[in-house]
Amino acid sequence: MALLARIPPGRAGRMWLRRRLGTAERGRDQLDRKLRVLIPELQRRRIQETRCSQQWSEACAQARTWLLRAAMLGGQEGLINANPPDLVDVEIRWETAIGVSYPAAAMMVSRPPELPPAPGNAAVVTAAAAFQKALLSGISAAAAQEAVRRIDAEIILTRQRLRALDKRWLPWLRAELAALEVALQQNEQEEGIRLRRAALALTDRRSTE
């Protein structure tokens, strides 16, 4: 591995590897903890997304039904006059879990003005209310879908990082540390043998003097 060239020699290398091994193991624990928090949250948000999407689908179907009734009673001109001139403002409430921000809820902070009853076409007012309900449901569904997308993307990224630690980085650090420990132990044994031989040689010289 290319990182091998970065390992300092000798005991300094042992300290270098131990520090990085400790950092990698702590990082792995944090990533594992992150998954334990995010996976249940993703399951909860998916349930919410399913419920919001179903409500949105039902509200859209009801709005289309009332739109058809209004069109049959008043024609296209009645629908054009019923179109609200103003846009609506949406407010998103954000939450954060283990560093991941996602929309927890969304609501309208300004609503379109209520329509006056159209002469001979009471279905327009009901249709407008049905479309406003569909809009509210769509806003909630969009927020729920975005929350699922963000949390799911973070889980995928976290799993990739965890896999990289488990499959490459941690095994490499442990193998390099074990090999260095063996090499240092051999060096210490060889150094001990040399010192003992030097001491014996010195003792022999002194005894012959």
Image (spheres, rainbow, N blue to C red):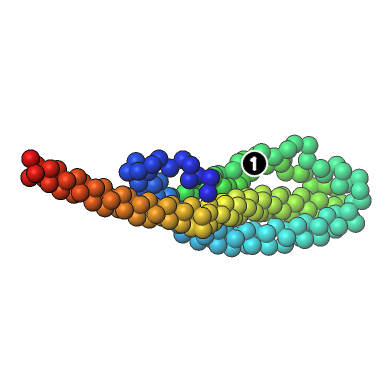
> Where is residue 73, by image quadrant?
bottom right
In depth, the one of 182 and 206 nearer the eye is 206
Q: Amino acid at mark 1?
A: Val
In depth, the one of 122 and 100 nearer the eye is 100
Question: Residue 4 at x, y = what percent?
Answer: 48, 45
Question: Residue 57 at x, y = what percent?
Answer: 73, 60
Label 1: state its secondary structure.
Answer: strand
The answer to whether residue 136 of the structure is visible from this angle is no
In depth, the one of 181 and 56 nearer the eye is 181
- Residue 58 higher or lower than 116, as above or below: below
Q: Residue at x 50, y 44 (%)?
A: 3
Relative to 26, is 4 on the left or the right?
right
Q: Residue at x 82, y 44 (%)?
A: 82
Question: Residue 21 at x, y = what percent?
Answer: 39, 50
Residue labelled with disc 1: 90
Question: Residue 58 at x, y = what percent?
Answer: 72, 62
Relative to 80, is 161 on the left or the right?
left
